[in-house]
Amino acid sequence: GWLRKIFVNTSLMKIRKRDLLKDSGDINDYCSECRISENALNTLYGKDLVRLISSMPVGFRTIFNLYVIEGYSHQEIAQMLGINEGTSRSQLNRAKAWLKERIEKLNMR
Amino acid sequence: MMTEDNEFEKKIRELVGSYTETPDEDFWDTIEKGIRAKNRIALVKKFSIICSAAAVVVAGLFFAFRSVNNLPLNQSSAIVRLDDNVKNGNVIMADAVSDVSAVNTNVSAVTKDVDVNDGADDGADVGASVSASVKTDIAAGAGVESDAVDSCRKTVGQESLNTEDVYKYNLYMAENCSESSSAKVHGGGIVLSASGNLSVFGASAEKGYQGSGIPGFSYGDGKDVSRFQGISPVSKPTHSIPVSAAIEVGYSFLDDMLAVGTGVSYTYMSSRYEAVVDNSFQADVFQSVHYIGVPLLFTYNFVRTDHFFVYATLGGSVEKAVKVSYSLKDLSNSVSYRNGNFPGVDCSAVLGVGFEYRFLKYMGVYLNPRVSWYFIEKSPYSAIRENPFQVSFQLGLRFHL
């Protein structure tokens, strides 16, 4: 637990220092048209998913990990990273769209 | 839509949560190596700072010494050298003397020829001025050569007032004093040096380890040395590389062949380990030990050129752990501190080879690889206690007064 916390906090500090989340777009339901087939999700392996998440752009990945994997709220993420909540929401939507697109591509192969 | 999104997130969370990956066997080793490399860099930085500080202190002492003794750097020695002109009947008058150091026999400032075959009256006048000039310069030449020149002057006497006497005086100086003076350029002298010392063996932490648990754990040579301040190690310690700085004063004699030196040294050692404290709780311990030592070293100089010297060093040192500090972090991450003084002193024997490059007449940089053996009786548990045989590199500046 403590080791994980150290890793997370150290990574966040680094991200904050490098200002990788500067993109503060409006809240935009970027993925409103984005669909993913049930089959694509069911045939997905954990290893492939982790690989896909690892290859996400760092801004997307940070928000995605904190929200989806770690379970933080947008308010908490905004505080942690020094951004506004809108940015956190839009980055998450973009991240999800990005991931869905990649999963579908993977499924089609 | 929201539900679909939630389903997606839930599925992702499940997949990631159920995924496990076994790290490579050398995963932690790689991390630890990285940390150690960083620590080493920090240590080298610290070492450089200590060296620089010591060098600044010694440089300050050096210049203070020179100003107290009123010795301008470019006239630190006075050598009068008479060349063949003397034999040819010309008397060389030295008006000024400069640029002579303990290793450099260059002599300049020969400015005026005087024909000794001039008339008697003129000769007497010239003789008087030449004698005075020579004596003045000799007198100005304080330092290591003055004894030799003084003895020459006494032998010759100071009453030379005519041309013939002047000629004899200078001839005598040329044949006897100049040679001895130039030999004395290598002669005895006081040497001030500042150095930093980096030991090669630091983080061995393996020798003699017997992790037999609590109670009855035992480390190093099995003596219960680690129970100082109620702290008993229960894990393999990691010792950092010992770092030390020293200021030494030496005196060389027998034409710079031999030298003896002493001074003050400071050594810092640190270690990390887990320990049981007061038989009641377990803690991560960071231990730092500060030593003050007095070395006594004999040096034999076996290669000497104008700028480069190679020498062997033999000697010993007496050291005392003047302060031992412990930082104890218990399992709830609260930190407490303890300090103490260790009784008694430790001795060590030193053998080494040194290389000195004298880039200025009065200043040189030296590197002194050496091996030491510590005869440890009362020292706290540390790198030298675990490994009494230490190889170290001493780097420093040396000032020749």
Image (spheres, rainbow, N blue to C red):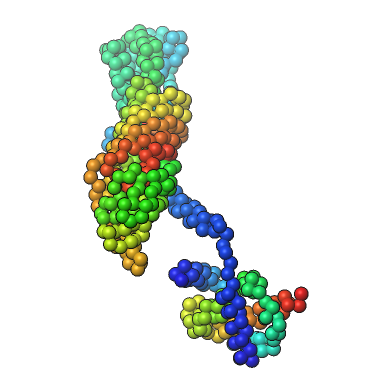
> At 34% across and 41% down in the image, what residue appears?
B246
A66 shown above or below B263: below
User: Is B291 left, or right, of A93 in this rendering?
Assistant: left
Write down the quadrant of residue B143 in the picture: top left
Write down the quadrant of residue B64 in the picture: top left
Which of B159/B199 is in front?
B199
User: Is B367 left, or right, of B324 in this rendering?
Assistant: right
State how many labels appear: 0
> At 55% across and 56% down in the image, what residue appears?
B26
B137 shown above or below B207: above
Q: Position of residue B81 (x, y in %)?
A: 41, 18
Which of B230/A60 is in front?
B230
> At 29% across and 55% down in the image, what residue appears?
B231
Outermost residue to the right: A109
Q: Position of residue B134 (x, y in %)?
A: 34, 19
Which of A23/B84 is in front?
A23
